[in-house]
Image (tube, grey):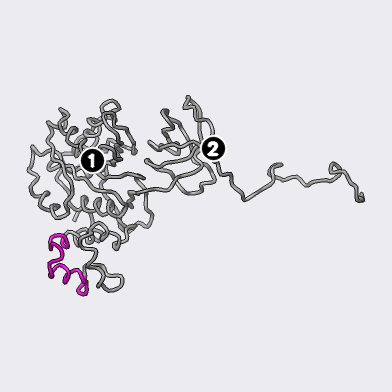
Amino acid sequence: MRRYGKHTDEDDIRTRPNRKGNRPRTNIRPKHEDAAEGLVLTVDRGRLTCLVEDRTVLAMKARELGRKAAVVGDRVALVGDLSGRKDTLARIVRIEERSSVLRRTADDDDPFERVVVANADQLAIVTALADPEPRPRLIDRCLVAAYDGGLEPLLVMTKSDLAPPDELLELYGALDIPHVVTSRDELENGDAADRVREYLDGRITAFVGHSGVGKTTLVNALVPEDRRRSTGHVNAVTGRGRHTTTSALALPLTVMDGWVIDTPGVRSFGLAHVDPSRVINAFPDLEPGTEGCPRACSHDEPDCALDAFVEQGHADPSRLYSLRRLLATRERRDGD
């Protein structure tokens, strides 16, 4: 057996090799302080297209991020090949803190939420006034998701040549939501896009709506130099549209500052992830009245202090009705 004295040379010391390689294991992760900043434009089967300075870069998520996923609108840090050349792949090593999150679940019983868009300032809810018929319950659910995620809503009503907007405007009037009413001709000749652009300057706006309402047609008109895939049609039997957008995509506005994010058409919008107590934050005129509510008040029960608050003239009764309608939509199915 070989013995070592006091003055052994380090070359004489035998080290046990790592069976998985010669690099020692460590829990210290690199900080990647020199990583480049990027914006996620779209996600497709684990590959993320990011905007880095003035070029698009294809990237994948680093293993160290674990299950944390990047979505369209995320601001990320990238390392590796950032040239944007064909057949190159960068690595996303960090996802920056989000300012807002639009989330949904498959249905109200699904505990797994899905982040649709990150860091958007505004949610444009597109609905047709006819062909297909408007679905107020779905609009309500989108509004709840917007309020819960920190986005300001914008209501865009299309196909006004087929039906008047009066009923919907009356239903949402108390919410004081900005709105735009357009016709099919205006969608085709660009007039609708011009009026919608007034609400988009300097903002990141996500567009949602069920299939067949003209959402992608509108996005094509807003960003004509980068048109999406062809639009679909409405099924004459079911009254529902065909999905024409299969993945979310962020597109820059060229005539002004801002971005639009086109999202796939939705037929349901689950709200299992939403805490009803957060929806009241979108009603600053009613919020002071909740101080007298019992603990964990649903704001739709006999002891709710909002009833007395409204009766005393501190807020419009229609606002309380709107709040309770939005809260109740979490308990109802879209088709109800």
* Picture residue at 25% right of the left edge, 37% below the top: 201
For label 1, the residue is: 211
- Residue 107 disc label: none
**Marked residue nearer the N-terminal end (1 or 2):** 2
Q: Which one is nearer the viewer's eye here, 234 or 180? A: 180
* Picture residue at 17% right of the left edge, 54% below the top: 175
Q: Secondary structure at mark 2?
A: loop
Report the amino acid beneath label 2: Asp
- Residue 34 disc label: 2
Residue 260 percent coordinates (x, y) = 29, 37
Residue 200, above or below 298? above
Q: CA distance from mark 1 to mark 2?
A: 43 Å
Q: How many marks?
A: 2
Q: Is residue 231 magenta?
A: no
Report the amino acid beneath label 1: Ser
Q: Which one is nearer the viewer's eye here, 29 or 112? A: 29
Residue 306 percent coordinates (x, y) = 19, 68
Residue 275 picture quarter: bottom left
* Picture residue at 18% right of the left edge, 32% below the top: 194
Magenta range is 301-321
Disc 1 crowd, CA 10 A, few/some/many (<14, 14-19, 20+): many
If the image is split into quadrants, where does the C terminus sit?
A: bottom left
Residue 70, above or below 331? above
Residue 145 percent coordinates (x, y) = 28, 52
Residue 255 picture quarter: top left
* Picture residue at 21% right of the left edge, 53% below the top: 140
